[in-house]
Amino acid sequence: MDKSAADAFVYAKAGGMLAKSFVGKRAALLFSARSLQELWSLLFTDEVPVVPETLLARELETQAQSVFIRDYKQLIANYDAPAPVLIALLHSFDYDNIKEIGTSLSLGEKEMPAVADISPYNLIAYRKWPDIAAMTDGSPLAWYDTVPQVSDQQQNDYRLDCQYVRELWQACAVLSPGCREQLVALLKEKLRMDNVLWALRLRIYYGMDGDLVRANLAYAGDGMRSDDPLAAEAIQTLGWELDNYEHWKHWKFASLLNPHEDSVVWSVEPRWLADAYKKRYVERAYRLFHRFPFTECPLVCWYILKQNELDMIRTASESLRLHVPASQAMQTAGVREVHNV
């Protein structure tokens, strides 16, 4: 199938799949289930496994992830040569997988941990477990060729995070001209906010100073330049006191911060900011889906929307397992209750 035909087919197919997905107003249906068994039946046609609730929640979340990956792979398989950004999004699973594998090997575990299967787009030769050098040989992860010491795991994970961010950022440079500006803006802002949130967590939870935080951010280029397109936003915030609203109130994302009241003690809350930004990010992707139908845009936006759906499925599953009220779970997931009038 040539690219123009593939673009048209994928756009139509992805749109049809979204219409049946639990996104937008339909997301509330995930939290209408009164049991894990009912949630399973809502999501899948397979028989509900007869296992304890804890195991059922795990199987449900694993199945939901597998379906998400399967559907995405089926969509990009329509292209003879999928755009780099489409593959880069999928590679996020392999970067998470290699972290899990490194941890398992460093702890001397004999069985490979459960991993997300993104074949044939995988970077890792999983069949060669437990030979870590053979598993990564010939791939961009070839440097990860020895079983790490537990003390080295954090630094390895940081290097993996930076490498993935660069892969995704470099893929943005070769997007189709028709959608490049809008998609780059969407993904760039997301990567910048990821750095901001990481910087906040390092300062608040680990007590790191500015220099140490800068050394743990993800950069688009070499070095730790203050004007780096992905790290500049986070570096800017390092000089702002965490409990001084005056330092934050003119920030371009100030509207996403936890509320401030005069004469009330305030401190920036990373979780609040993360939730508020995620809502903005997903809404932007939803609006972009139909704007550039015969480019990479619909599929990138589909991925973002379905990834958010997966997060909501996990929240719904865990809330049922832990007997959390549906209204509270919906609030956690950023889903509005829908009332029939």
Image (tube, rainbow, N blue to C red):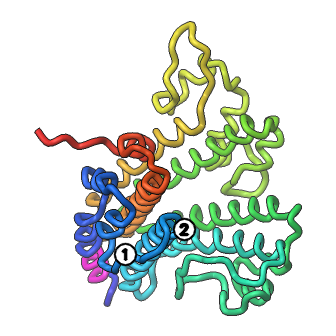
**Where does the image place residue 5, in percent across and percent down from the top left?**
27, 83
The first of marks 2 and 1 along the sequence is 1
Quarter of the image with the N terminus in it: bottom left
Q: Is residue 170 visible?
A: yes
Front-most of residues 78 and 3: 78
Residue displayed at 45% across by 85% down? 81
Q: Are marks 2 and 1 in contact (CB under 8 Å)?
A: no
Quarter of the image with the C terminus in it: top left
Q: Secondary structure at mark 2?
A: helix
Horizontal placement of 22 versus 100: left or right?
Answer: left
Determine crowd level at label 1: few under 14, some 14-19, many 20+ residues with C-alpha closer than 10 A.
Answer: some
Residue pointed to by mark 2: 171
Which residue type does callout 2 highlight? Answer: Ala
Overall secondary structure of the magenta stretch? helix
Residue displayed at 44% across by 69% down? 60
**Where does the image place residue 186, in percent across and percent down from the top left?**
45, 52
The stretch in magenta equals 4-10
Q: Secondary structure at mark 1?
A: loop
Q: Is residue 208 magenta?
A: no
Residue 155 sits in quarter: bottom right
Residue pointed to by mark 1: 48
Vertically, is 290 above or below 284?
A: below
Determine crowd level at label 2: few under 14, some 14-19, many 20+ residues with C-alpha closer than 10 A.
Answer: some
Q: Is residue 9 magenta?
A: yes
**Where does the image place residue 164, in percent across and percent down from the top left?**
64, 65
Vertically, is 227 above or below 148?
A: above
Q: CA distance from mark 2 to mark 1?
A: 40 Å
Residue displayed at 72% across by 33% down? 238
Which residue type does callout 1 highlight? Answer: Val
